[in-house]
Image (cartoon, rainbow, N blue to C red):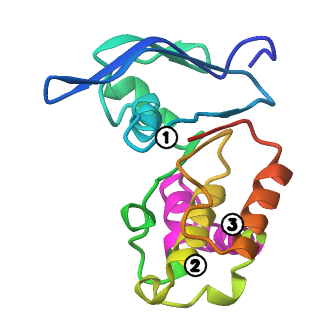
Amino acid sequence: MRPDLPLIAARGLGVQRHGRPVLCDVDLILHPEERLFVLGPCGAGKSTLLLTLLGFVPASAGTIHVFNRPCRCEADFAPLRGPLGLLFQDSNDQLFGPTVIEDAAFGPLNQGLSAAAARERAWEALQQVGIGGLAERPVHELSGGEQRLAALSGVLAMQPTVLLLDEPTASLDSDSAARVTAVLAASGLPMVVA
């Protein structure tokens, strides 16, 4: 990937839900080493924007290019869901493994890693966000803040090229929020934070 080309380019993006506009004429350009913050009130469409960039919500207008390739249909978006790591707004939408480490290993397993390699990568991600001690805990026993950290671990375990983060510090106490902020800053990854 050439450093002068954007990683993600959305131009004139529009989204409608139930016949009502949710996004209108949105432009978003993310270059390597950039961190973009999308700001707006609740219900402004920030989450919808992230989901549209991954093809989970169809665009009704505009274009999306990821890694300089046009994305128009599921076949275009599907291979990008590893390199574009999405942290959902609600951790309950993201966590489903029986234990924290099994949940974090799910993505690497689906990337073709062996069970041992996936578990190692999951362990590294858990350590990275500071929840290695929760590795064997059942996901349903986690507090809201612990769920958020576990979900972020699952995203980082996939070693994405770009992060799409929907309220990454939501539900976290000040210490955990500071830890997440430090982890994201240290990652050096380009990101869109909504």
Q: First in sequence, mark 1 or 2: give its number.
A: 1
Which quarter shows the C terminus? top right
160 left or right of 184 in image = left
Residue 128 image point, x, y percent: 77, 68
Residue 22 image point, x, y percent: 31, 27
Q: CA distance from mark 1 to mark 2?
A: 24 Å
Mark number displayed over residue 149: none
Residue 11 image point, x, y percent: 50, 10
- Viewer-proximal residue among 157 and 22: 22
In the rendered view, would you say 92 is above or below 2? below
Element under disc 2: helix
Residue, disc 2: 146
Q: Residue visible at 53% across and 54% down?
A: 112
Q: For the residue marked with disc 3, what is the amino acid?
A: Arg
Q: CA distance from mark 1 to mark 3?
A: 18 Å
In the rendered view, would you say 89 is above or below 106? above
23 left or right of 30 in image = left
Q: For the residue marked with disc 2, what is the amino acid?
A: Glu
Q: First in sequence, mark 1 or 3: give its number.
A: 1
Magenta stretch? 103-127
In the rendered view, would you say 157 is above or below 95? above
Q: Are marks 1 and 3 in contact (CB under 8 Å)?
A: no
Q: Residue visible at 69% across and 80% down?
A: 131
